[in-house]
């Protein structure tokens, strides 16, 4: 399936919009996600450009002739792991939307990353599908935001998640292995074309004291099904083309869409997670506020215990 | 064409509007991206219905209404290819249509016969007639007949024209035109016309042109009917012993090339003779040695007229029995041999069968096998013989009664009734020989009778014979020598001298053979197969019942006239006649001149375009208006029905798609 360029619309430039959004929402109002003192060695990983050279393991370089950096974790690690859906369906931009769903998701991801980084919490980035995507390990520091934004801006949408069985493994597997207790895992996706097991696997990430937040990002057209008369609808993932009478099937469609949301919401709630639905036409600040509130509420209600 | 008419016709294009709208609606919807498409349920029933016309009846009604509306607006341009008369200032017309129903009109050209085209033209003319017009129809087959007397009832005229059928008659254009002119001449309409629908082939190509005489204008619109149609016809076929003489005519003469005459018995060909390369009209001999049964002569190959390609072969001789009733003692010759009348009949070579009888049979059964009878000098008839003889003659028997010296010697109870009512006297002839008028009957042979000297002669009371008796030859003193009288369906020849050489030298005269030949002809006419030309009439004197069945098993109409019944066959072929329970066979032959298709000349003014047009403007407005009204009513009914039976699917309300 070909890659689709991202329609950034009015969201570009991402860096500035995300910074403004995060600063506006959380100017002095946020709380640190870091909790508790002490740092313990969390393992090695390959060096990627931009890593803090202080954590470069010189001994390992001499021993293995590889650039490895040391990772440290604390028991109270509140790091943020972003999982951004870059499948083909995310490239959709409806007639009334300011930008594509991916652009909106990237804006939210960058803003959340900036908020977390501002609190000194590391931010990692994983991808579901997409092209030219660069996973980012959890990192903190001033350059982390730039790296997150750079990764988001350089990505392109593509791939059929229902056919690509490895897409979830790459994203969820890495987080399952590395995310510690207390890590906040935020999934930014339309949740439409995810494989059937996606919900269970994402919910499974909530084990071990991790905090889950799923943000469903939909276009205004997807939320309202504004068509009339006979329409032929082509899915961006897969080859399904549906001809239907929009007036006759609108309610049925919206019910199924709501059922997906309800299913995710119920499952995540059961696993201590939160679910937020967003429209690309919504005010992104409000979505950020709801997301942070959801996560904060999770802590308020004592998820850690 | 004015702008208004063009615009009206352009309205007809709107007929495609509902269908185009339907096509637009059933066109595949624009495809668009929609990521959650798999969550959308397809709705095939609705989509499929939208591809079809939901209410076909309503769609058809609306389409027809649009068409009717367009035609209604453009009516002045709706023309039909039909025959129409040119009118003089719109005045009413007295129209006589002369329709040629002769054999040549059956010629097939371009899959249609000339008759079909002429009948269609006649129908068009009647359809084009208006209120106040008078229409008459005359048939030009010989003899000309009035099929429809002048009438202003156009519906009746239309019915008559459409009921006409062609015949095999000859053509009589002169007579038909004269008849047509006579019947329209006295009509009140000032504009009178005679329209001739014919191939103009009346057998007189060199006669004066048609249309030059007469005070009623003649119009001959279908001049293309004169296009030649190659044809060969078998006119008649006669068998004489083992040979058939077949009369054949072809037009053009070269049409006979590579064709031949076959004589068939059932499916078996029993004789064949090739035709010469050019056979305008000739007799062809066909050898029929050993052939038996009902024979038919036919010309091989195909031509424009199939009806005249076959003719039955008639046995002009044979199967005709004539009895000679003579006293062997009195009729014998001194030199020996058969009586002279018997020898004379045999000498005619008419292939008749002779049966000598010494006495007249008393029983009718014994007479039934006889067609004719020559009774020589009888001494009267007994009551039983008279009764059977009367019944036999009444059925068509022919008798030559030669009265002699024994006539007045009839015994008690014997007489000659009903052949000769009253008394008969026998006396020496006061004056020898017949008068000069005998030559009318016998021609040059009558000279031998002018000095005939019999020993005596019979005298008959003419008044007792009644008005039907006719004296055809007289003695010089005016007394009858030969009397002919019909009796029932039979015929009686009364000869006032006997044929015995002992009494007269009549048997030695040539006129005697002619007399016998006349008797044989009369016998064959009333008993054997008898052929006439189509259009001629059969008259059956004294017939009580008569049924005639034609070649197509069609029963012919019998005309009752005082004392006789008449039938006019109009088709070539064999006719089965039931005459007072007797079965007879008659044959009708085609006219030779009907084969000659050379057209009669016509005058210039008879084919002038000013007389009419082959295209008629037909005002369809009233019919279209009624049709449009009916369609609107139909649409209302359909919509009412649709309202009473609402669709199960709310999205399925469009009547056309």
Image (spheres, coloured by chain):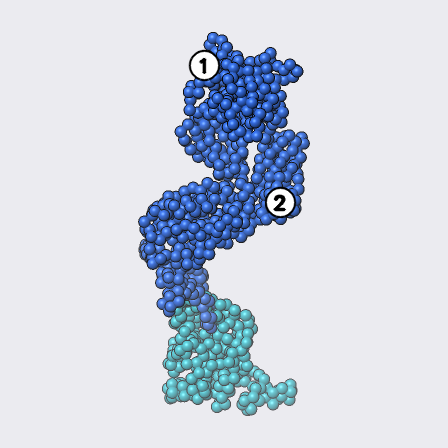
Query: Which residue is drawn at the image coordinates 60% and 22% (left, top)?
Result: B508
- The quarter holding residue B319 reads top right
Q: Which of B552 and A72 is in front in this view?
A: B552
In the image, residue A81 sits, relative to residue B520, either above or below, namely below
How far across and down, in percent of the image, does residue B603 sit? Answer: 46, 54
Residue in front for this viewpoint, B3 or B272: B272
Subunit of label 1? B
Q: Nearer the viewer, mark 2 or mark 1?
A: 1
| Closer-to-camera residue (B20/A64) | B20
Classify A211 as above or below B343: below
Q: In this view, does B312 lie to the left or right of B621?
A: right
The residue sitting at 54% across, 34% down in the picture is B531
**Residue that label 1 marks:** B423
Q: Which residue is drawn at 49% across and 12% down?
A: B408
Vertical relation: B81 (above or below) B161: below
Measured from the top left, where is residue A58 in percent x and y? 60, 90
Residue B172 pos. (x, y %): 47, 44
Query: In the rendered image, which residue does mark 2 sit on?
Result: B279
Label 2 SS: loop
The answer to whether residue B539 is left or right of residue B70 is: right
Chain whose colour in the figure is blue: B
Name the colour assigned to chain A in the rendering: cyan
User: Chain ID for label 2?
Assistant: B
Q: Distance between the residues labelled 2 and 1?
A: 60 Å
Q: Would residue B360 be seen by someone viewing this image from the given angle?
A: no
Where, quadrant-wise, is the C terminus of chain B in this rendering?
Answer: bottom left
């Amino acid at each position: 399936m070909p890659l689709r360029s991202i329609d950034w619309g009015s969201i570009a430039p991402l860096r500035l919009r995300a910074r403004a959004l995060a600063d506006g929402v959380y100017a002095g109002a946020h709380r640190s996600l870091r909790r508790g003192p002490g740092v313990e060695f969390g393992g090695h990983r390959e060096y990627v450009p931009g890593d803090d050279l202080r954590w470069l393991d010189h001994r390992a370089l001499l021993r293995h002739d590889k650039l490895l950096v040391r990772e440290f974790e604390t028991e109270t690690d509140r790091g943020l792991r972003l999982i951004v859906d870059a499948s083909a369906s995310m490239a959709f931009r409806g007639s009334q939307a300011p930008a594509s769903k991916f652009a909106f998701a990237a804006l939210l991801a960058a803003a959340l990353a900036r908020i977390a980084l501002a609190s000194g919490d590391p931010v990692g980035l994983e991808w579901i599908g997409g092209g030219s995507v660069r996973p980012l390990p959890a990192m903190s520091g001033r350059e982390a935001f730039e790296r997150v934004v750079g990764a988001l801006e350089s990505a392109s949408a593509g791939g059929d998640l229902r056919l690509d069985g490895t897409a979830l493994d790459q994203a969820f597997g890495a987080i399952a292995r590395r995310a510690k207790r207390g890590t906040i895992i935020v999934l930014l996706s339309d949740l439409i074309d995810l494989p059937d097991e996606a919900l269970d696997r994402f919910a499974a990430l909530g084990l071990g004291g991790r905090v889950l937040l799923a943000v469903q990002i939909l276009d205004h057209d997807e939320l309202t099904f504004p068509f009339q008369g006979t329409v032929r609808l082509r899915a961006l993932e897969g080859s399904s083309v549906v001809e239907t009478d929009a007036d006759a099937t609108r309610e049925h469609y919206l019910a199924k869409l709501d059922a997906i949301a309800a299913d995710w919401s119920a499952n995540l709630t059961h696993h201590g997670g939160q679910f937020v639905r967003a429209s690309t036409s919504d005010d992104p600040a409000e979505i950020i506020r709801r997301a942070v509130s959801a996560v904060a509420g999770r802590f308020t209600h004592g998820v850690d215990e | 064409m004015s702008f208004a008419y063009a615009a009206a016709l352009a309205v007809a294009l709107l007929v495609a509007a509902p269908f185009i709208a339907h096509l637009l609606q059933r066109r595949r919807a624009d495809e668009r991206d929609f990521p959650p498409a798999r969550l959308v349920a397809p709705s095939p029933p609705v989509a499929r219905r939208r591809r079809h016309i939901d209410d076909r009846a309503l769609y058809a009604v609306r389409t027809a209404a649009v068409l009717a509306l367009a035609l209604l607006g453009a009516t002045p341009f709706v023309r039909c290819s039909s025959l129409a008369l040119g009118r003089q200032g719109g005045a009413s017309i007295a129209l006589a249509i002369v329709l040629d129903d002769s054999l040549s009109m059956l010629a097939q050209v371009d899959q249609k016969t000339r008759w079909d085209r002429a009948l269609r033209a006649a129908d068009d003319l009647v359809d084009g007639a208006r209120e106040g017009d008078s229409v008459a129809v005359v048939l030009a087959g010989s003899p000309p007949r009035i099929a429809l007397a002048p009438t202003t009832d156009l519906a009746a005229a239309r019915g008559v024209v459409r009921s006409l059928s062609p015949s095999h008659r000859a053509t009589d254009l002169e007579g038909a035109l004269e008849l047509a002119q006579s019947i329209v001449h006295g009509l009140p309409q000032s504009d009178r016309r005679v329209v001739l629908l014919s191939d103009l082939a009346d057998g007189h190509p060199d006669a004066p042109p048609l249309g030059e005489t007469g005070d009623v204008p003649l119009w001959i619109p279908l001049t293309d009917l004169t296009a030649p149609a190659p044809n060969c016809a078998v006119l008649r076929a006669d068998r004489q012993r083992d040979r058939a003489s077949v009369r054949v005519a072809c037009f053009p003469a070269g049409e006979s090339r590579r064709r031949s005459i076959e004589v068939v018995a059932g499916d078996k060909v029993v004789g064949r003779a090739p035709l010469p390369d050019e056979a305008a009209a000739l007799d062809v001999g066909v050898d029929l040695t050993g052939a038996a049964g009902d024979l038919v002569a036919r010309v091989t190959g195909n031509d424009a007229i199939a009806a005249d390609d076959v003719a039955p072969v008639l046995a002009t001789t044979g199967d005709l029995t004539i009895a000679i009733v003579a006293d062997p003692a009195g009729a014998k010759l001194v030199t020996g041999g058969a009586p002279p009348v018997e020898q004379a009949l045999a000498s005619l070579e008419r292939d008749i069968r002779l049966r000598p009888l010494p006495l007249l049979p008393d029983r009718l059964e014994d007479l039934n096998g006889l067609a004719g009878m020559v009774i020589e000098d009888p001494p009267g008839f007994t009551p039983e013989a008279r009764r059977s003889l009367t019944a036999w003659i009444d059925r068509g028997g022919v008798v030559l009664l030669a009265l002699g010296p024994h006539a007045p010697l009839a015994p008690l109870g014997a007489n000659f009734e009903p052949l000769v009512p009253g008394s008969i006297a026998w006396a020496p002839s006061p004056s020898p020989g017949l008068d000069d008028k005998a030559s009318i009957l016998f021609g040059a042979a009558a000279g031998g009778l002018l000095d005939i000297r019999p020993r005596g002669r019979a005298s008959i009371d003419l008044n007792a014979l009644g008005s039907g008796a006719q004296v055809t030859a007289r003695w010089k003193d005016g007394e009858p020598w030969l009397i002919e009288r019909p009796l029932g369906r039979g015929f009686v020849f009364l000869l006032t001298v006997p044929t015995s050489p002992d009494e007269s030298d009549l048997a030695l005269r040539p006129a005697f053979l002619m007399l016998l030949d006349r008797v044989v002809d009369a016998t064959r006419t009333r008993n054997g197969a008898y052929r006439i030309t189509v259009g001629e009439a059969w008259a059956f004197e004294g017939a009580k019942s008569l049924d005639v069945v034609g070649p197509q098993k069609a029963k012919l109409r019998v005309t009752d006239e005082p004392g006789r019944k008449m039938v006019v066959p109009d088709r070539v072929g064999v006719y089965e006649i039931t005459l007072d329970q007797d079965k007879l066979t008659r044959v009708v032959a085609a006219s030779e001149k009907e084969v000659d298709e050379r057209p009669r000349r016509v005058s210039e003014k008879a084919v002038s375009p000013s007389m009419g047009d082959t295209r008629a403007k037909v005002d369809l407005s009233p019919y279209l208006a009624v049709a449009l009204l009916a369609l609107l009513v139909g649409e209302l009914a359909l919509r009412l029905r649709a309202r009473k039976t609402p669709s199960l699917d709310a999205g399925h309300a469009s009547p056309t798609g």
